[in-house]
Amino acid sequence: MVSYSSLIYGVGGIVVAGMASLVAFQEKLVYVPVLPGLTKSYPTTPDRLRLIFEDVWLTSADGVRLHSWFIRFSPNSTGPTILFLQENAGNIAHRLEMVRIMLEKLHCNIFMLSYRGYGASDGYPSQNGITMDAQTALDHLAQRTDIDTTQIVVFGRSLGGAVGAVVTKNNPDKVAGLILENTFTSILDMAGVLLPFLKYFIGGNPKKILNFVVRSPWNTIDVIGQIKQPILFLSGKRDEIVPPFHMEMLYAKAAVNNKRCMFMEFPNGMHMDTWLTGGDHYWETVETFLQENVLKNENVMKSSL
């Protein structure tokens, strides 16, 4: 018969082993540049979809070489321009079909950034590093003379929303608006969602004893309340990765001091397909947000054709 003390030691050993794995391999859980069964390289490129684009190579503040695609709606399109910040898994090529539809529906330019360690970019991902990468991309857009730099919008899904919130807060003079889709309150809160036993040790609300071991906390809930620009929250109610109440909490925190917040739910939206299952309603919501908060007049999109 197994003694009570042996059981306690066994459970304790499992917890310790789990915590040790988290400390050692947490970046591999938060950042997944390569999807299972695929390579790090791009499975497709914008030219295969007959998109108007240019390869853009940037150097981050710490010297990391970054690859991006700047995709235009039309040869003479000046804006609006969306800085697209992707989820944690795969690379920008895996988002090209969604971006193609975004171009068609919104008549905008799109800048797709490969975080360090993703796609053709050098380096290894980290919270500090990816934040620098997003800042580098935004600085590049703000210095371009072929777009309207007053119409730069940050769009982030999941991890990209956390990245986008930081870069938007830090650049009130460069970012005209922020769009968040299926984003978490923090990685601290997500730890207990992905590995339930961790909720007793790691979490942002209330703060837990082992939060200090998390190297990429991405505390979006703390950042969102400091943003002054307009924010659109797009929430898939069937999100199987990030509990939808995370988006509700982010909206509630932002709306306390920011009256230019808009929240929209999509009943059938899952973590990665809200843009698809939301159909025309999804794109009409985004277009309305842009027209009311970013564009100089309702015909700006059409004038760039």
Image (tube, rainbow, N blue to C red):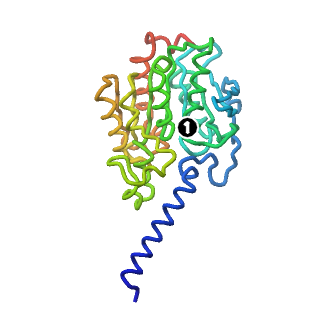
Residue 48 is situated, as x and y percent measured from the top left of the image, at 70, 33
User: Which quadrant of the structure image shows residue 256?
Assistant: top left
Reading the image, the residue beneath label 1 is 128
SS for dot 1:
helix
Name the image quarter holding the C terminus.
top right
Residue 298 is situated, as x and y percent measured from the top left of the image, at 43, 12
Q: Is residue 157 above or below residue 35?
A: above
Residue at x 53%, y 24% (from the top left corner): 82
Count of labels in the image: 1
Residue at x 57%, y 42% (from the top left corner): 126
Q: Is residue 227 above or below residue 126?
A: above
Q: Is residue 51 above or below residue 250?
A: above
Residue 20 is situated, as x and y percent measured from the top left of the image, at 52, 61
Residue 197 is situated, as x and y percent measured from the top left of the image, at 40, 62
Residue at x 50%, y 14% (from the top left corner): 150
Residue at far bottom of view: 1
Name the image quarter holding the N terminus.
bottom left
